[in-house]
Image: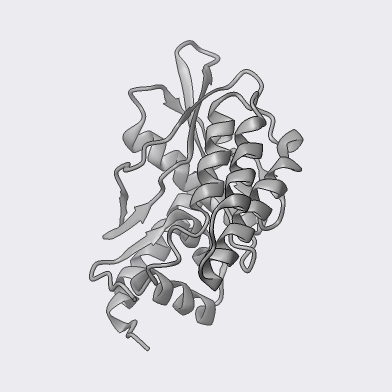
Amino acid sequence: MITKRAEPRISVNKLGEYIISKAARQRSILYGQKFPPDYVTPFYEDAGEAISLFIAGAMERPSILESRIKLLEQAPANTTWQQRRAIGNIEAIETFMGMIDALDLSGVECRLGSNSPPRLSIRNVEVSVRPEVILSRPAAKGGAAIGALKLHFPKTNPLSEDAAGYISAIATRFCDDFLSDDGAPDSRLCFVVDLASERVYPGVKSVRQRLKDAEAACEQIFNLWDTIKEE
C-alpha cells in the first residue's frame, strides 16, 4: 500500500542527499517522499531504537544492543519482508557496535529525542528532522550548548561528507527553532552517524551557506511537488 502526501514534505536525511544529487536522483527522492510505501518507514525501527537508547545511556550498557540482537534473532519471521527486516536490523546494530570508538561524546550529556517532535518549515516544505538523541554540554561562556544526533541507515544510499554536512546544518536549525530554551545551538554537537558508510560525521562548524542551499532546495521541492505523479 502506498500513501500519498499532498503537501511537500521530506526527511532531513533525504534533503541532505537531495541537495547534492543530480536531477534524476532528485526526482526519485521526491517520488519516494510523496508516495512512501507503508513498509519503508519502520524498517530500521529496532536498530534505531536500540542504538538511540545505548547512546542516551552514555554508551555504558552494550547489553542494550546485544539484547536487541537476540530478540531479533528469536522473533518469528513469517514473511520474506520480516526476514529481511530482522537481518537488516541485526546487521545495522552490529555495524554500529564496530563504530562505537569513532563516536566521541566525552563531556556530553545525552537524552532521547522526542518521538513526535515538531517539523521545520523551510520555504513551504515540512522537513522532518526528528533527532534520535539530544546532546548538551557546558558552553564556554556559561550556560549550555545543545545539539542533535542523526542516524542514517539505508545501505543503498550511503551519505557523502557533503550530504552529512547539510544534515548537520539543518539539525542545528532545528535546535535553534525548538531547543533554544535548553541551551545555545552548537553545530559541532550535531553529529551524523551513517551506518551505510560506517562513518561518524562530526558536526559542521559553518552552517550559514548550507542553510541557504537548503532553502534553495526546498523552494525547488515546493515548485516540483505537484509534478511528481504516481507511477
Which residue corresponds to the image point at 64% horizontal and 64% vertical from the top-left?
A: 155
- The x, y position of residue 181, in whole percent, is 33, 23
Q: State the quadrant of the N terminus.
A: bottom left
Looking at this view, is 48 or 158 the one in front?
Answer: 48
Q: Residue 106, located in which quarter of the rendered image?
A: top right
Identify whether 33 is placed above or below 148: below
Color scheme of the displayed model: one colour
Identify whether 231 is placed above or below 174: below
Which residue corresponds to the image point at 53% horizontal and 58% vertical from the top-left?
A: 76
Q: Residue furthest top?
A: 142
Looking at this view, is 224 or 2 the one in front?
Answer: 2
Looking at this view, is 189 or 65 the one in front?
Answer: 65
Which residue corresponds to the image point at 39% horizontal and 58% vertical from the top-left?
A: 215
Which residue corresponds to the image point at 39% horizontal and 41% vertical from the top-left?
A: 174
Q: State the quadrant of the C terminus.
A: bottom left
Q: Is residue 124 left or right of residue 146?
A: left
- The x, y position of residue 7, in whole percent, is 24, 67
Count the numbered circles shown.
Answer: 0
Whether residue 175 can be seen here: yes
- The x, y position of residue 86, in whole percent, is 58, 58
Whether residue 159 can be seen here: no
Q: Residue 91, located in which quarter of the rendered image?
A: bottom right
